[in-house]
Image: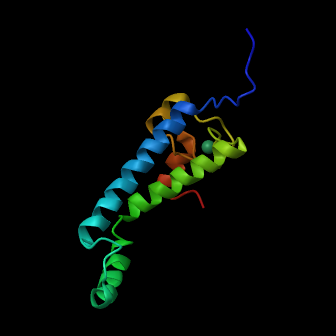
Amino acid sequence: MARTKAKVNPYQPYEDALRQKQRQLLDSYQRDKAAGNAQPDDGIQDLADKAASAYSKELNFSLSDGERNLLMQIEEAFNRMRDGSYATCTNCGNVIGEKRLQAVPWTPFCIDCQELQEKGLLS
Ligand SMILES: [Zn+2]
């Protein structure tokens, strides 16, 4: 069977899961933003402009710390996929188990290091 030269990403299912989660987070964020900003962008909003931009500045922070954190971890997971270090614990270098990746595809840690981190034992 001839193999195509197309790059096969062994982590495709995880990548899909990551993208889905990322979209979910960004969608709810966009919705928040849209709800706070009823005026369409192309409208004339001279006076309202300042207030609106101050408001949307606030909305930039409408994601919770946990959600922002998660988005960052997702970004980093994509980076690790690109440089080939995905599914490897960033702390100890062990392979992260498949089940763990299925549950938390953005995790940078193997289960042992995750426990250390949760106990505050990782710097
Ligand atoms: Zn580890």
Quarter of the image that includes the N terminus: top right
How are the colours assigned in the image?
rainbow
Residue in the image at 35% along x and 72% along y: 41
Where is 9 relative to 32, above or below?
above
Residue 106 picture location, percent across and down? 51, 45
**Splitting the image into 4 quarters, where does residue 35 fall?**
bottom left
Q: x, y (%) of residue 47?
A: 28, 91
Q: Position of residue 114 (x, y in %)?
A: 52, 47
Residue 65, image x, y percentages: 39, 65
Q: Between 4 and 74, which is closer to the camera in this rendering? A: 4
Vertically, is 19 above or below 25? above
Instruction: Look at 59% across and 36% down and name the residue there.
Output: 96
Q: Is residue 119 visible?
A: no
- Quadrant where the C terminus sits is bottom right
- Judged left or right of residue 86, residue 36 is left
Residue at x 55% of width, y 41% of height: 112
Q: Is residue 64 left or right of residue 121?
A: left
Judge from the rendering whether residue 110 lies leftward or rightward of residue 94; answer left or right: left
State ligand 1's quadrant. top right
Rendered image quadrant of residue 3: top right
Residue 86 seen in render: yes
